[in-house]
Image (cartoon, helix red, strand yellow):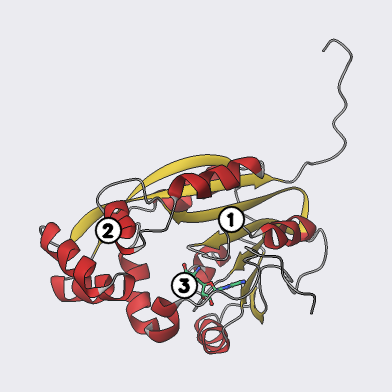
Amino acid sequence: MPARKPGDRSGVIPSPNIWHWPHLYEAENRAQDVDGALFEAIRSAADWASKTVVDVGCGSGFHLPIFAADAERVVGVEPHEPLVELARARVADLSNVAVETGRADALPVVDGSVDLVHARTAYFFGPGCGPGIVDAMRVLAPGGTLVVVDLDATASPYGDWMRSDLPHYDPAAVEAFFAAQGFDLTRVDTRWSFPNRRVLSDVLGIEFGPRVARRAMTAVDGTAFDVRYRLHVRHKPSGIELRRAGG
Ligand SMILES: C[S@@+](CC[C@H](N)C(=O)[O-])C[C@H]1O[C@@H](n2cnc3c(N)ncnc32)[C@H](O)[C@@H]1O
């Protein structure tokens, strides 16, 4: 394998939350975006009905059945083998879904065969993820779309907790990176809602260190709070653009 350049994030990035506590991450996924604002925003960027979708870094496959409900074909790609197994078990009864072991910079998918590449809370898509973007563009058909969904650390309250927990994380640098790569940015406001404060506390405990998790728990009155996301969208050109002189 060729040596990677400094800052190259194309390798597998450890995800302690879902790697170590997949059952709590499942509870977190169930609590996230309970009003469906993210899927609505993704659908207006690139409707996947009757199309082919690749979910990169699909984890235990939580979003695969949602895409599969009206996509023609869905492929989940995940490097962490225990999660590949969980995702395969989840979609065992869905004939239009496959789960492959793989990673963002070497997708196990043929060129030009995909309409939507989706990557959600995928730490491997951030500054330095050029090889992953190049590979997404390779697998997309002309006119296809890459959508990177991530948490917006600039919005309260969740973003405040993120920045306290990750003082070196620079939201402006992340946004500048995507803008320079030709992505459009949409901010999407969502609500996370938990069945009770015990589950809320457990989930905050896998996302943040103990001090920030305690502070967040105190700040939440009840079992729900707002979380803003960033949606970075890049379309693959659909063909040669003909421009008329003076047009
Ligand atoms: C925070 S989890 C999100 C999982 C899933 N997208 C979800 O929302 O439920 C991030 C996932 O990215 C995977 N991952 C890490 N590095 C990767 C890479 N280079 N290519 C593809 N996936 C990667 C991790 O194994 C983990 O499953």
Residue 124 sits in quarter: bottom right
In the displayed structure, does residue 166 sit left or right of residue 95?
left
Q: CA distance from mark 1 to mark 2?
A: 21 Å
Q: CA distance from mark 2 to mark 3?
A: 24 Å
Q: Helix or strand or loop: what does disc 1 sit on?
A: loop
- Image position, residue 30 (x, y; %): 34, 69
- Looking at the image, is mark 2 or mark 3 nearer the viewer? 2
Q: Earlier in the sequence, mark 1 or mark 3?
A: 3
Q: Amino acid at mark 1?
A: Pro
User: Residue at the spot x=41%, y=58% of the render?
Assistant: 168
Check the image and name the residue furthest to the front.
6
- 117 to 75, vertically: above or below: above
Q: CA distance from mark 1 to mark 3?
A: 25 Å
Residue, disc 3: 62
Q: Is residue 113 visible?
A: yes
- Say whether mark 3 is within 8 Å of ligand 1: yes
In the displayed structure, does residue 41 sit left or right of residue 235?
left
Q: Quadrant of the N terminus?
A: bottom right
Residue, disc 2: 161
Assess disc 3: are there few (<14), some (14-19) or many (≥20) residues with their C-alpha within 10 Å of its C-alpha: some
- Image position, residue 109 (x, y; %): 76, 70
Residue, disc 1: 127
Residue 53 sits in quarter: bottom right
